[in-house]
Amino acid sequence: MDLVPALWTSAHAPDAPAARRLVARTLLRLRDFLRTLALTDHTPSGGY
């Protein structure tokens, strides 16, 4: 997973509200999924 400093800080800050941590972690996962999906077209075996 690539690091996005603002999201990473919000996702793992112990003093941040739980809702903000949840949203930041979800956005990090979504970004990672979309990046993997985009790279699938560029691998010889289709990513599998």
Image: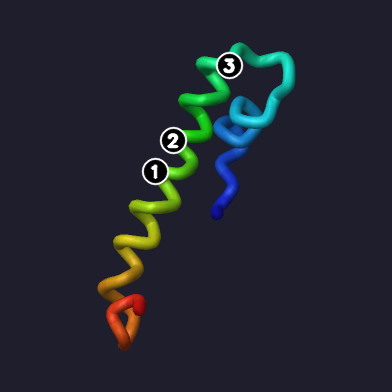
Q: On the image, which quarter does residue 48 sit in? A: bottom left
- Labelled disc at residue 27: 2
* Residue that label 3 marks: 18
Q: Amino acid at mark 1?
A: Leu
- Residue for point 67% across, 30% down: 12
| Mark 1 Cα shell of 10 Å, populated few (<14), some (14-19), many (≥20) | few
- With 9 as the anchor, is 7 left or right in this view? left
Disc 2 is placed on an element classified as helix
Percent coordinates x, y for residue 35 in the rendering: 38, 57
User: Could you tell me which residue is drawn at 30 percent across and 62 percent down?
Assistant: 38
- Residue placed at 70% from the left, 24% from the top? 13
In this rendering, position of residue 18 left or right of residue 34: right
Q: Rate crowding at label 3 as few (under 14), some (14 to 19) or many (20 or more) other CA atoms within 10 Å.
A: few
Disc assigned to residue 30: 1
Instruction: Look at label 3 and name its amino acid.
Output: Ala
Sequence-earlier tag: 3 or 1: 3
Going from N to C along the chain, the mark reached first, 3 or 2, is 3
Say what amino acid the circle numbered 2 marks. Answer: Leu
